[in-house]
Amino acid sequence: MRKVFNTIITVISWIILVLALLVTILVFSADANGGIPSLFGFIPLTVESDSMKPAFAEDDLIIDKEIDDVFNLKEGDVITFWTLINGNRVKNTHRIISVNNADANINFTTKGDNNDVRDSINVYPADIIGQWTGTALHGWGRAVNFLRTKTGFFICILIPMIVFFLFELYKLIVVIVEVKSPHAPQIDEEEIRRRAVEEYIAEQQKMNEEKSDEIKAEE
């Protein structure tokens, strides 16, 4: 039972550690890339409005992928890009409704699925962040935003990592103590079964001998 419990704790600890490392990589990559996290070419982003409902909504987490060639984009694709809203440079994710290609220059007209009018500013290649893969995790964007704060990082990342290393240190200390302390040699299950069989056979032989002696005495 103790071994099963330790195995479960170890598996959970490793899962937490891997998740912590992934989040850490995303946080640092975002800081180094103008606020855009990236992991192996995939970009997790938090939706900040309902302009694309029902495809995804505010606080959802969507996964974009980096674009190798903008000339492969077509009408109907959903892209994330930098744009100006009320004088502020912000990220936006809308659907391409028109591809404007002339003299090797290309730009895109976009529109939110839930909007009545198209976007007033066309999107140029330099403004494009990535293309939506079709993956949307409902409500997870808020959790990711929390993890990127100092409080979230401390509670959900730093503390679990400390607990993980303390648990591994405890297991190491237990192993060292068991190795150094004198104890009786461990007998495996196969050896226990073998001895039990030998004892049973010996007991049966003894009983047979006693019966044989009784029979001879009666004669």
Image (tube, rainbow, N blue to C red):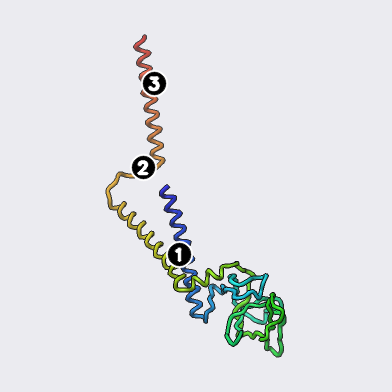
Name the amino acid type tagged 1: Leu
List the residue tagged with mark 1.
17
Instruction: Give the Cα distance between marks 1 and 2.
Output: 36 Å
- Say whether disc 1 or disc 2 marks the residue closer to the N-terminus: 1
Label 2: few (<14), some (14–19) or many (≥20) C-alpha neighbours in 10 Å: few
Q: Nearer the viewer, residue 148 or 37?
A: 148
Which callout, 1 or 2, points to the residue nearer the camera? 1
List the residue tagged with mark 2.
187
Say which residue appears at 63% left-offset and 84% top-offset. 125
Residue 112 on image: x %, y %: 68, 77
User: What is the quadrant of residue 110 in the picture?
Assistant: bottom right
Name the amino acid type tagged 2: Ile
Label 3: few (<14), some (14–19) or many (≥20) C-alpha neighbours in 10 Å: few
Which residue lies most toward the top here?
Answer: 219
User: What is the quadrant of residue 195 in the picture?
Assistant: top left
List the residue tagged with mark 3.
208
Instruction: Give the Cα distance between marks 3 and 2.
Output: 30 Å
- Say whether disc 3 or disc 1 marks the residue closer to the N-terminus: 1
Query: In the rendered image of this protein, does residue 186 appear above or below residue 124?
Result: above
Residue 136 on image: x %, y %: 61, 69
